Amino acid sequence: MEKITYIGEHLWIGTLGNAFVFLSLIAALVSTVAYYFYSKEELTSEWKKFARISFSVHSFAVIGIAGTLFYMLFNHMYEYSYVWQHSNNSMPMQYIMSCFWEGQEGSFLLWTFWNVVLGNILRRTMDSKWEAPTMAIFSLVQVFLASMLLGITLGDFTLGTNPFILLRENPEFANLPFVQNPEYLAKLDGRGLNPLLMNYWMTIHPPTLFLGFASTLPPFTFALAGLWKRDFTGWQKPALTWTFFSIMILGTGILMGGAWAYEALSFGGFWAWDPVENSSLVPWIVIVGAGHVMIINKNKGGSLFMTHLLAIASFLLVLYSTFLTRSGILGNSSVHAFTDLGMQGQLVIYVITFIFLCVALLIHDKLIRVSYIMCSIVILTVSIFYGHKKELLLCWLGASTVITIFSYIKFFPKEEEEESLYSREFWMFVGSLVLMLSALVITYFTSIPVLNKLFNLNKAPIKIAEYNIWQVPFAIVILLLVAVTQFFKYKKTDPKLFFKQFRVSLILAIVFGLTCTIPLYLYKDYSAASALNKWNLISYALLFISGLFAVFANAEYAIRVLKGKIRHAGSSIAHIGFALVLIGALISTSKKQTISQNTSKKSVEGLGEGFNAQKSLLLTKGDTLPLGKYMVTYKGKERVGIDVFFHMDYFERNEKGDLRRNEKGEAVRAFELSPMVQDNPRMGKASNPDTKHFFNNDIYTHITYADLSDDSPKNKNAYKEPTNFIGHMGDTIFSGNAIILIDSITTNLTEEQFSKSDSLLVVTAVLKATDVNGKVYRATPKYVVRNNMVMPDQFEVNELGLKFIFWKINPNEGSIEIQMSEKVNNAKEFVVLEAYMFPYINALWLGCIVMVIGTFIAILERRRVNKISHSVKS
Amino acid sequence: MKKLHIVGIIVIAVAIGVIFTSLQSNASYSDFSEASKNPDTEYHVVGKLNKTIPVQYDPKVNADECSFLMTDNKGVEKRVVLHKSVPQDMEKSEQIVLIGKMQGQEFHANDILMKCPSKYNNGKPQV
């Protein structure tokens, strides 16, 4: 085939990008090896220098990849597949960042980039003793991440996806005609960013979340370095700040995702227990546990195995979450997992490699370690060449678990004395265990698609309600621990003194909690509820009371014990924030009210549980219908680009439930909402809710069904083609704006009189037309027979724009035939909407902010104390 | 560390409890014929929308009811009544998962999940 010379391509930049990709991979590899040798012979500075330089080269290369990709996006170089797929000419500049991380390659790059930033800070701030082992592991992680950008296919195994592949070399588009056109670039415009993602959330949420993912790496490397160097405590002090940094950033990232979902997506809530959400929540829960056991260790010693386990697990769970969301294994069970790019094999290998590394480092016996490594290699080889991958994977995981337990018993130092029941460390440890348990339960349920694949099962994912049932008890225990644990002292506390300290908070919480929960959950709902719902209601009440207890007790501790010194109160503030998050989540979810109601009055409750949610409200333009505390009017739609806004007015209601009117007789408008449906040419229709925020509740409205086409103003008063209805007395006819009942049929003559053929027969059909507001109109079309001639008589209902002609009687069937014509503008515009009221959801957002501030204060204080102790030492 | 042993036992007990209850629950992917055998049990049925017959939805009659034909993975076609407003872009779906139960000859669903693989990826370079 003749070689085509393409015009206008910038091939050099792709080459540059790929050079950076290879450089970053090789430099990371070299850095791993160099740090490994440096850790072996700590005195030889050559390895140290070499290792540092190669990590710097790796950092430079990663920044180079990111810079190249940015340059390509800024300059609209559509010859590159990634640029074409994620941007276009009309893209506003502020979204270029969003294009950068919209795709898989870009988001991997973002993760790698944050790792590089954190890695450099880590290397410069830490004690030189830990540099070699931690950075060796750090570099190894970077090797794996860098390989995600390679884009090499070996047989059916894909190693990474390359962001610098040319559009015409993308196998997806290989056979399209543009490939044959040497001037294709001149007229090419990119596909553009998914318009759903063109909002500020997409600019801030991914960087925060990926910084959160990256921040789990330093604690992980420290913990592994501790195992490697058999120094189980030394790493914990430097790792503690990192752990709390991770708690803060990852927590922020997750809650930002919740806020995004609540504000801009239409599943009606801030948390749906979607696998993608879960898989970022689980590492957070685990790292919160890790942070707390590390505090025990710092203050009192002990809990060594738990600190290692949790610090390691949180990063492994980030890897596992990467596998879940990017391998395509979630398939049907998630709304927002990435599409499968054929990297399942590679991702599995990543997760396995790091589990392997952890277990191998845990074994302190050379013989066992070598046999474990050999066994793993044999299993890997067998699975590659002989198949049975699933069975062998399960065997290997089982063996690794057994060895982990064995190593814990055999090699881990254990405390001699038993912890007192009245000690802070005991209850903090229990708290961390509960967190771990909650994380395990979520992971197990989220992994159902994986378990299906491993064990050839066919289980469907569990529902949101089931997640809640499982997690509420954990939350209650955690909140109680959050409330009381700080009143314990390390080692030993006087029980009498202990209970005395939080008496006031406890009484307050119980009194205030019961006054709220009895009317909220127990008084009205309880007796009518099913056994399961009874359990739910009680657990909600308990959760509410323990949440209040946690808030009060922490406030009391901060004021009374810490004497209100903000600097020391970081943990109390963070705990108050955490409790507020849970209280806000509890009230806004359990007391979420569907305020839109189906008006069809058709009950489906007979179908059983799950079938009672009749919540779609049909709202015709100009109509005013009740919606919770309000009356709502649909005013009309407005198209702005691809966004179609539906303007709604919300009016206040008076005591009788009617529109409240002011002195002038005008209805009092409370507020206006404009939910939107995006008529997205690429992605189809996407509904975007609009929410009115009040101090104590939110009114949330979203459109589920609407006609997005423009109205045609012409011939509004003409009648459309008539339609014929055959009906009996008592039947109904539906028009665009009314329901018409054939009420009765009367005649002026008896049968006897009619038989005298010359008389005039008038049969009248009495129709009762009820419009959407319930107003009844009478229509009386007549069937007139004079001298055996049928003379149909038409009847117009002007208010409804309807015309009826009674033109036939079928005496044998006893039915009549009526023709109905509707005016063109009768087909009134309507929307179908769902609306909810979320009470006290602001407690959730306030809690988020308070929690982040509290954690930040705690980090600052820890850094200050560390500095002082450092300067005292030197 | 006796107390911690007790805590450990509780952990294991909860883990077993989770696995046990989740294995007991009936929520598994299935097909119409199995759903017909147990009319009062909830099933997740996977299949494809019959696109030759339009989805019926008249919000004026009931905004929470739409009806269509779906062929399950074994090739059995049934009329489905979905007790929700009609999902947007349903006719573009490649695969649907219904959650509900069989009642007579109709499958009554209270929820639907749709898979539109091209949803985030369609569009081809054109010059």
Image: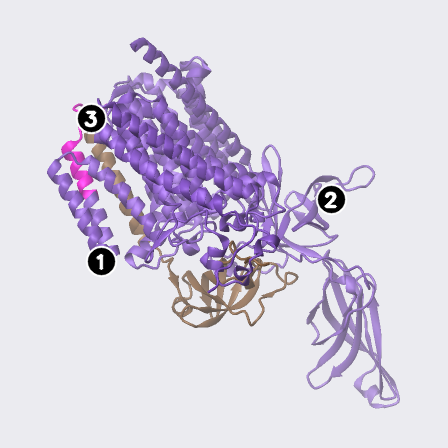
Q: Chain A takes which shade in the image? A: purple
The residue where tag 3 is placed is: A41
Earlier sequence position, callout 3 versus callout 2: 3
Q: Earlier in the sequence, mark 1 or mark 3?
A: 3
Disc 3 with disc 2 on a shared chain: yes
Q: Chain of mark 3?
A: A
Residue A650 falls left or right of residue A821: left
Q: Position of residue A90 (x, y in %)?
A: 63, 46
| Quadrant of the drawing holding the C terminus of chain A | top left
Q: Earlier in the sequence, mark 1 or mark 2?
A: 1
Inter-mark Cα distance, 3 to 2? 83 Å
Q: Is residue A224 above or below residue A707?
A: above
Cβ atoms under marks 3 and 2 closer than 8 Å: no
Who is closer to the viewer here, A279 or A812?
A279
Question: Residue A229, percent across and down?
Answer: 21, 28
What residue is drawn where x is 59% and y is 50%?
A: A687
Question: Is residue A43 shown to the viewer in this render?
Answer: yes
Image point (55%, 50%), residue name: A78
Q: Nearer the viewer, mark 3 or mark 2?
A: 3
What segment carries the magenta color?
A: A401-429
Colour of chain B as rendered: brown
Amino acid identity at mark 2 = Leu
Q: Which residue is mark 1?
A: A385
Q: What's the chain of the residue with tag 1?
A: A
